Amino acid sequence: MKPVITAVAFGVATLGIAAFSIMDAVMKDLSLAIGAYNALLWRTMAGALIGAALFFGRRSAWPGRPAMRVHLVRGVLSAVMAMLFFWGLARVPMAQAIALAFIAPLIALYLAAILLKEKIERRAILASILGFAGVIVIFSGQAEADLGPEAFWGSVSILLSACLYAYNIILMRQQALLAGPMEIAFFMALIMVASFLLAAPFLAVLPSAEHLPSIIGGAVLAFVSLLFLSWAYARAEAQHLAPVEYTSFIWAALLGYFFFDERVLPLTLAGAAMIVVACLVAASRRSPATADAECGIPGGIT
């Protein structure tokens, strides 16, 4: 029965990654139009309203203290993480942004050593070196293409987001075991909105009517994706779901090409391949707990 459950979880996770990737494209377009902060503020607010209707409509029980603590930490972390990611995404090609974000599981290696007191194996250290070399290759391709300083700082912003996501990887599995998908989706959106509202007096601008379809569409896609991924991660270990999350690079390349006329640079492909191989090598022959931390991919970054 377990292989069947894992296969179903794999399929659901595939749909979740596809929805997240389409949402990324919608948010990139929205960020270019009204700025990353306002795009996130209004999309997350719309998501919180959708989540509230479903959560309270089902008369769901209020989460206990352990679950609420994880919701709060992950929600605040996700707000900062998303801001960094979408600010960067507005400045670099989608495929390059996703490729750089793949570095998060390798950073999680060292966080697991610090937070979980786990010993890092030699193969994992070598894999992390390969992964970071892949980042350098991607930056080299960016310099060769002469994308300008905006693209450079956008890439740096995405790398900072990936560093935060490395910790998010450790929280994700813990959260999925403490709460259901609906609860996770609602409280994630609610806490992110509260975080964004702190800067509202200085940065918030009411969106025009033409941007409402993108805001609502982005909110629905983000909410559906989070539901799918939370459902999948609650039923299968992250190490079994890792391969499907790498399909986000394919989605990013296709969406970037068709909607933003972005070409995938050969060095971006090479760098992405190096990082993916490094993540798979690092996750192999590890304990389940460490593999969970190492196989998480930035599907949940946004």
Image (cartoon, helix red, strand yellow):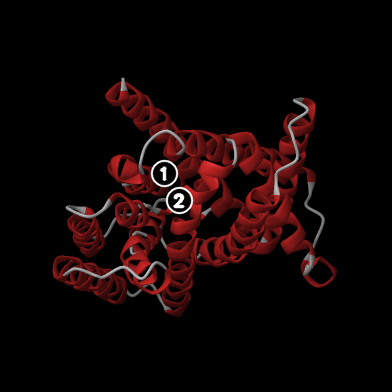
Q: Considering depth in this image, is 204 or 121 the residue closer to the camera?
A: 121
Q: Which amino acid lies under the numbered mark 2 shown in the image of this protein?
A: Phe
Image location (x, y in percent) of residue 131 = 23, 67
The residue identified by callout 2 is: 260
Quadrant of the image for the N terminus?
top left
Q: Which amino acid lies under the numbered mark 1 shown in the image of this protein?
A: Leu
Q: On screen, 82 above or below 54?
A: below
Q: Secondary structure at mark 2?
A: helix
- The answer to which quarter of the image holds residue 73 is bottom right
Q: Secondary structure at mark 1?
A: helix
Q: Considering depth in this image, is 159 or 27 the residue closer to the camera?
A: 159
Per the rendering, the mark at residue 255 is 1
| Residue in view at x 33 percent, y 64 percent | 103
Distance from disc 2 to disc 1, alpha carbons, whole Å, reads 8 Å
- The answer to which quarter of the image holds residue 237 is top left
In the image: residue 222, left or right of residue 273: right
In the image: residue 29, left or right of residue 211: left
Q: Considering depth in this image, is 129 or 238 the residue closer to the camera?
A: 238
Is mark 2 in CB contact (under 8 Å) with mark 1? yes
| Residue in view at x 33 percent, y 75 percent | 146
Image location (x, y in percent) of residue 267 = 21, 64
> Which of the marked residues, 2 or 1, is nearer the chain's N terminus?
1
Label 1 packing within 10 angstroms: few (<14), some (14-19), many (20+):
many
Instruction: Examine the rendering and report whether any part of residue 98 can be seen.
Output: yes
Q: On screen, 81 above or below 246?
A: below
Instruction: Examine the rendering and report whether any part of residue 247 can be seen.
Output: no
